[in-house]
Structure formats: structure tokens, C-alpha cells
Amino acid sequence: MVESSPVSGTRPGNMSAVVVAQLRDAILDGFYAPGQRLIENDLIASFGSSRGPVREALRRLAAEGVVELVPNRGAIVKRLSHKELVDLFRMCETLEGLAARTCAERVRAQQAPEAFAQALADVGLSTLPPPGMSFPEANRLFHQVLVDFSQNAQLKTTLDQMRIPLVRLQFRAAIDAEYQRASMAEHRQVVAAVLAGDPVAAETAMRNHLEQAGSRLLVRPGEEPGA
């Protein structure tokens, strides 16, 4: 059963928001697998909610593309095809490249690279890789800092929705030590470009990073990386 926060006394609208957030996190953490049915009665018991907020949460997550509402089956965790994942990665390359470019523009305009350095330090990323932090957590926080520092609310909302299937993909993939070293080296290149206030270099470094990540994570069974 999913561990949930107490929601007694919460208004119906707020209750739906709580269930949305908790269910989204449960899917993100891999508690529910792609293709798995989401049984309303089980969710009601898990989240301590009534049926209305659970149904509203499922509708919201369906609108985000996180779950699918299938006739005669109910809600299931959305399973993306290989092509859909490739398309999603290509969109992320563009959008996160824009986030990195915007961060560098902000640093250049304000002449304040220390502000970006502090944003990284605030979440424990003073060094890459950070000591004692798991790779998935460090990777998630790094990308989160870039988007947050860009101060583009629309970009943040879009990327937050897109990242759920991509994070689940990373959980299923073989993230070995070599992959982690390469990824962190690419992160350092992005950071260096942002701190230098170089928008073009920052965008290029981020897009290269995601292109490399996609070439590894999206390998089909029997294919070689980059095939």
C-alpha cells in the first residue's frame, strides 16, 4: 500500500490535489508499473480519500498523459511505445536546452554566477557527482535546478509532466557506473557553460547530454547503443 499523508478535514478540491500529487509520486517512484490497472477501491484505501477526489485525480493525470482511462477497464498507468519515448526525449532536448540557455542568460545579465552555484548547493550539488547521493536523485535534482533557475513557469509545468515516463524509463534501464560517470561529466559541462554566462554553449551542452542519455536509455533489446 502506498504510504500517504493524513488528509482528514481537507476540502474536496484540496483533497483532489493531494491525491494527484501522491499518486503522481507513486507512479514516478515505480510503485505502479506501466500498464498496471489503478483500482479505485485500492486507491481510496491507500490515500484515505473518498471516491470523488480519486476519480478527479485520475482525470487530471489522464489529462497530463500519465494514466489512460480505458473503457471497460478503468484507469491504467500509461505505457509509452518506443517511438513515443524517442519523440519525448527529442522534445526534452529542445525544452531543457532552452532552460539551460535561459539560466546562462540570467547569469550573464545579472553578472551573478554565484546565484546559480548557490542554487546547486542548496540541493546538495556543490560537487558533481555529490558524495553520498544516489545517481537517480542527483540526476533529478540537477535537471530540476536548471528548470527552476530559468524562472519559466510554463516550461517547468511542461517538463514536470514529461519527466514522469522518462524517470520510469531510467528505473528500468541498466544505469551502470560508466553511464553515471559520463552523465555527471556532461552535467559539469552544462554547469560550466551556465556559470560562464554562455547561452549558446549551455544549450548545446544540455542538448548533447540528453541526446547521449537517449541513445543509451532507448536501446531496444538486441540493439547496440546508438543504433
Image: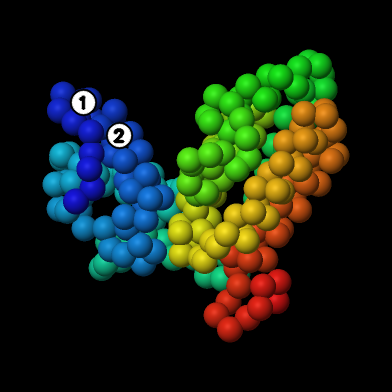
Kind of residue at badge 1: Thr
Residue 15 seen in the current view? yes
Image quadrant in which you'd find residue 96: top right
Give residue 222's position: percent from left, percent from top: 58, 84
Residue located at (22% from left, 25% from top): 11
Crowd band around label 2 with a 10 angstrom C-alpha radius: few (<14), some (14–19), many (20+): many
Residue 154 position in % (x across, y down): 60, 34
Residue drawn at (33%, 48%), measured in percent from left and top? 26
User: Is residue 147 in view?
Assistant: no
Crowdedness of circle 1 by 10 Å Cα count: few (<14), some, many (20+)?
A: few
Q: 43 or 227, which lies in front?
A: 227
Which residue is rendered at x = 73% and y = 30% of the image? 103
**Element class at badge 2:** helix
Question: In front here: 67 or 99?
Answer: 99
Amino acid carrying label 2: it is Val
Residue 147, given in percent of the width and then of the height, sits at: 62, 34
The image shows residue 136 at horizontal and vertical percentages of 50, 49
Q: Upstream in the sequence, badge 1 or badge 2? A: 1
Quarter residue 50 falls in: top left
Task: Please state if 45 lies on the left or on the right of 212 as rendered.
Answer: left
Label 1 belongs to which residue?
Answer: 10
Residue 201 relative to residue 178: left or right? right
C-alpha distance separating marks 1 and 2: 9 Å
Q: Residue at x 63, y 35 (%)?
A: 127
Q: Which residue is mark 2?
A: 18
Q: Is residue 22 left or right of residue 151?
A: left
